[in-house]
Image (cartoon, rainbow, N blue to C red):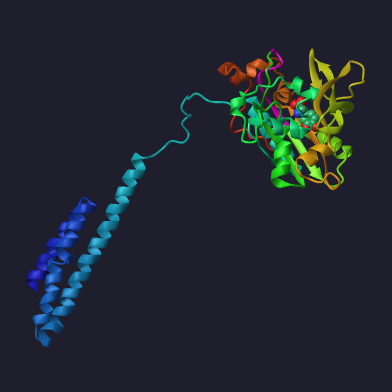
Amino acid sequence: MTDLNSQKQAALEAIAAAGTLDALEEQRLAALGKKGWISLALKTLGQMSPEERQQAAPAIQAIRAEVADALATKKSDLESAELNARLASERLDLTLPGPDMPRGTVHPVSQVMDELAEIFADLGFAVATGPEIEDDWHNFTALNMDESHPARAMHDTFYFPESDNDADGNRMLLRTHTSPVQIRSMVAQGAPIRIIAPGRVYRSDSDATHTPMFHQIEGLVIDRGIHLGHLKWTLETFLKAFFEREDIVLRLRPSYFPFTEPSVEVDVGFEVVDGKRVLGGDGDAPGHGWMELLGSGVVNRRVIEFAGLDPDEWQGFAFGVGVDRLAMLKYGMDDLRAFFDGDVRWLQHYGFSPFDQPTLSAGVGAKA
Ligand code: DAH
């Protein structure tokens, strides 16, 4: 017993002196491990007489408990010391200014598309997409422009060589408008439909207001009993939300598109402020005017038929508008070509913070 007591004394001193968790583990193994001195002492109990055992067992258990306690206490001391050391060395000062890194901005076209998606989502419209490499049937024929239709010539189409025709012999092309997404949506989902389709379109045309690639957004509603009144209300609601003005006034002018009947061209009243046209107000008022903004109409029953729906059951309205044009009008740029130059200075000036997501509650117009 005296032997065990002095071993215990030595062990408690070694435990107290252990400076690391590893050193402490060594002490635990030496005492309580399989071959540790306490484990060995416990094994000797088996060879003792019952009287000897009755005396020795509680003594050895007491030593075991004392050493185990000392190990546990030391372990938690060492662990909290280690944690404190890590907290001290890994501390971050969150009040330091952020590093001076190049900061990207959101392109006005992306910003406007996000704004439009937000406005139309609130009206129950989903966002639909279609391919930019389109076939002749979706881009023209199904939109009531067969091969001989004169409206085709107005589109300055980029065609692919005939060797790239699709399996049905359709000529491939870069879509000239987002209207083929109308057809794709009707074919894919049937009716009813409420979608907008923003995206890139291509025409062989280039000057200050035309670039070979530009952006449109298409709108399509297909349901029962749809008429021009639904179109007018939707466009008015959308334009008021987009331009953040209640005094947006629309003028619907009869027009012609092969895929709508009747077709209407929509003008918006503007006033001139500091030499710039600003949308809002009655275009007929003195000093005001009308600006042509978008094309729209009631979906031609031939188009509904082409897309595989019954035009006696389903009607709809559609509209198409230039996204770049909307951005220029809202944010005051005057040269479309700059949109696609990738000039960082232009982007710093006209771009938007990625943190400034358009939301209806905050007013979709981000502060540039
Ligand atoms: N697709 C036409 C264009 O690019 C725009 C357009 C006009 C779209 C009338 C429509 C519409 O959906 O109804 O010139």
Q: Is residue 224 magenta?
A: no
Residue at 68% over, 37% down:
359
Q: Nearer the viewer, residue 212 or 99?
A: 212
Residue at 23% over, 66% down:
68
Whether residue 12 is situated above or below residue 226 in the rendered picture: below
**Where is ligand 1, by quadrant?**
top right
Q: Is residue 234 left or right of residue 351?
A: right
Q: Is residue 142 left or right of residue 54?
A: right
Whether residue 47 is situated above or below residue 192 in the rendered picture: below
Q: Nearer the viewer, residue 133 or 59?
A: 133
Where is the N terminus found, in terms of image quarters?
A: bottom left
Whether residue 276 is situated above or below residue 14 in the rendered picture: above
Toward the left, the furthest residue is 3
Q: Is residue 212 magenta?
A: yes
Toward the bottom, the furthest residue is 50
What span is in magenta?
Answer: 207-217
From this viewpoint, is residue 68 visible?
yes
Residue at 65% over, 26% down:
173
